[in-house]
Structure formats: C-alpha cells, structure tokens
Image (spheres, rainbow, N blue to C red):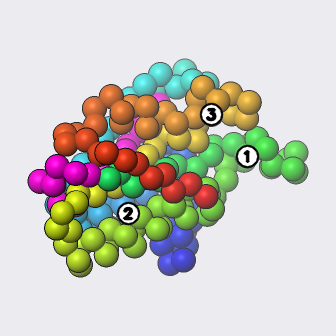
Amino acid sequence: LKFINEQCDLGPRFPGSTGHRNAIKYFTKHFKPLGDEFTIMEEVIAHPYETDSLRMSNIFTRFNVNAPRRILLMAHWDTRKIADKDPVKENRALPILGANDGASGVAVLMVLAEMFSQNPLINLGIDILLADGEDVGHAGDSENFGLGTREFSKHIPLPRPEAAICLDM
C-alpha cells in the first residue's frame, strides 16, 4: 500500500505530465539498485490524438541476467489522461490518479523486486517491465492502448522470456 500511495502522491502519470517525469525518477531510484540490469527504454512514436510525438519510457529490470530460462513480470505504470468512462460527465476530461489501474500492479512488482534482490535467483531469470503508454487510448478505440508493450516487443533483450505475467488492476 505504501508504494501505491507514493505513486499516487506523484499525481496523474500520463506521458508528458509532471507526474510522469517524477515517476521515472521514482522508479529509477527503486529498481536500479535492486536488479542486475536496469534500463529505461525511451520510445517516441506519433501520438494517436495530438500533433506532438508521444514520448514513452518503458522501465526494464533484470534479475539473474545469465539464466537462459526467463519469465517476464509486467504492469503498466502510466495513467489515463482523460476519464472518458467516468459516470460523472464533468469528470470525463480530467486525468485519473490510477491507484488501482497502474499503481497497484507496479506496487506488487516493486515488492517482488525487493524480494528477488534479497533472495538471489539460482535457476531462473526474472525480467520486470513497467510498460508506459498502455492507457493512451480512448474508450472504444482499442488500437491505441498497449503502445508501450508494442514498442517493447520490437526489441526484447536476449535471452527472451518463455512466459509473461501481466498484473493489471
């Protein structure tokens, strides 16, 4: 719960926001000292709704890097820029805080990263991906969700994971 509260204290974390920039620093401070490898995978694509580019940051941490058998654990860390499904019409243009959608899955991965760091893995490698740009889409437009994982899938580091588990809400 502590990690959920800390993420929410950063504010909404949609790409381009102050909360987004602060979250990158927050995740770097947490994950970088825990894993064997830590990478921020910067991705820039055409924004599906705006004239600017969409700048995303996938956060990637590896444990037991040399293990050929790997599992990927992932969650998205970004939040929705608009609450387009909010039952209160006046709220639909506002960003959401993302305690359940975003912060909760990431919080579980933060705890697991601490556990993997304190109890080194022997026969299995674990990769943790905090995907960005997953909640860019608008209701009814499924093509513009999952943008960060699409970019990540273009250059998954070797050895690739055999399985993936996504923690979302």
Q: Residue visible at 36% across and 33% down?
A: 153
Q: Which mark is residue 137?
A: 3
Tag 2 and tag 3, C-beta contact below 8 Å: no
Residue 157 spot, x, y in % from top left: 22, 40
**Residue type, numbered disc 1:** Ala
Q: Is residue 51 visible?
A: yes
Q: Residue visible at 19% across and 72% down?
A: 120
Q: Which mark is residue 101?
A: none
Was residue 7 drawn as part of the magenta stretch in this picture?
A: no
State the residue position of label 1: 83
State the residue position of label 2: 26
Residue furthest to the left in view is 66
Q: Secondary structure at mark 3?
A: loop
Q: Secondary structure at mark 1?
A: loop
Vertical side of 132 occupied by 153: above or below: above
**Could you give the CA–CA distance between mark 1 and mark 2, rounded to whole angstroms?**
24 Å
Residue 161: name its quadrant: top left
Residue 115 spot, x, y in % from top left: 31, 75
Main SS of the magenta part reads strand
Part of the protein shown in magenta = 54-70
Q: Residue visible at 60% across and 26% down?
A: 143
Residue 109: name its quadrant: bottom left
Left or right: residue 117 versus residue 86 is: left
Left or right: residue 124 versus residue 9 is: left
**Residue type, numbered disc 3:** Gly
**Could you give the CA–CA distance between mark 2 and mark 3, rounded to whole angstroms?**
25 Å
Was residue 68 drawn as part of the magenta stretch in this picture?
A: yes
Residue 80 spot, x, y in % from top left: 62, 46
- Which quadrant does the C terminus fall into? bottom right
Q: Earlier in the sequence, mark 1 or mark 3?
A: 1
